[in-house]
Amino acid sequence: MCRLRIFLWRLLGIDYHQILRVQDNVFLKKDKFSELGEGTYDNGALVFRWTQAPLRIGKYCSIANNVRFIVDEGYHTASGITSFPIVNTLFKEEKTLPDGVDKNEFLSAVNQREGITIGHDVWIGMGVHIMPGVTLGNGITIAANSVVTGSTEIPDYSIIAGTPAKVIAMKHDKDVINKLNDIAWWDWDKKTIKSRVKDFYSSGQTKEESIEQFIKKYGK
Ligand SMILES: CC(C)(COP(=O)(O)OP(=O)(O)OC[C@H]1O[C@@H](n2cnc3c(N)ncnc32)[C@H](O)[C@@H]1OP(=O)(O)O)[C@@H](O)C(=O)NCCC(=O)NCCS
């Protein structure tokens, strides 16, 4: 089916792979080196990568439109002397570097920031860019159009915003955060989550009251 589609698109003069893979990006859903946890959804997020560095996203994360994961630095920081990726560009056709050094081996030994890890129940707002090397925990909300870098420690259940993204608020106090992390509702099976749906929402009571009840009911 896919081959037929590619063939038909080619007849129309459309490069199928170019549509799916614009330059060096690929849809998150199609990325071979990304792992998405149970329940996590996205609206066409793109992954930019030049290496096979992992992108790991936990369970029940919500990823809005126009989100970009920049998984590695594309070898621009390989040299302190230049940001130009000499090996990747000037040696594009060669398998070895001068003195017979294997090009891929040389590149794999190069030190650069790469890989992204995101916890569970993270809401990534529209237009967010996540930079190489970022590690985020659970329950975090990332405000629209923020650029998340690895430069600041981001606590669980915080709301972060801006460029570079910084904590603008905490959703809960430390004790509640610890208890929610201990409950780890994202590890419940889907059937259980569905059967307990009402406990996730406040019906007429305040948010604080419903969290308290949730912790009372499911806390260890
Ligand atoms: C993060 C978010 C949930 C915060 O909402 P909120 O709790 O109601 O926060 P407020 O609007 O009261 O803003 C709080 C502060 O953060 C700032 N802020 C909010 N969003 C921001 C953003 N995207 N970038 C920078 N600062 C932001 C506000 O200016 C405000 O600053 P101040 O306290 O100095 O005035 C919301 O701003 C957001 O980005 N939602 C994502 C929307 C989205 O992407 N929807 C897609 C559908 S899935």
Image (cartoon, rainbow, N blue to C red):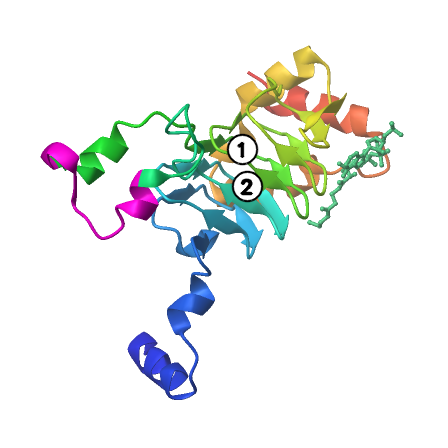
Whether the magenta-drawn stretch holds residue 89 is answered as yes
Whether the magenta-drawn stretch holds residue 202 is answered as no
Q: Is residue 173 left or right of residue 155?
A: right
Q: Residue at x 61, y 17 (%)?
A: 179
Residue beneath disc 2: 60
Q: Which label belongs to residue 120?
A: 1
Q: Position of residue 188 (x, y in %)?
A: 49, 35
Q: Position of residue 187 (x, y in %)?
A: 47, 33
Quarter of the image with the C terminus in it? top right
Quarter of the image with the N terminus in it? bottom left
Where's ligand 1: which quadrant?
top right
Q: Which label belongs to residue 209?
A: none
Q: Is residue 218 above or below residue 197?
A: above
Residue 182: name its quadrant.
top right
Q: Of 142 and 157, which appears nearest the observer?
A: 142
Q: Of 13 and 210, which appears nearest the observer?
A: 13
Q: Residue at x 16, y 46 (%)?
A: 95
Q: Is residue 28 above or below residue 96?
A: below
Q: Is residue 201 visible?
A: yes
Q: Given contact means CB atoms under 8 Å apart, are the residues at marks 1 and 2 in contact?
A: yes
Disc 2 element: loop
Q: Is residue 129 left or right of residue 100?
A: right
Range shown magenta:
87-100
Q: Position of residue 131 (x, y in %)?
A: 53, 34
Q: Is residue 196 visible?
A: no
Disc 1 element: loop
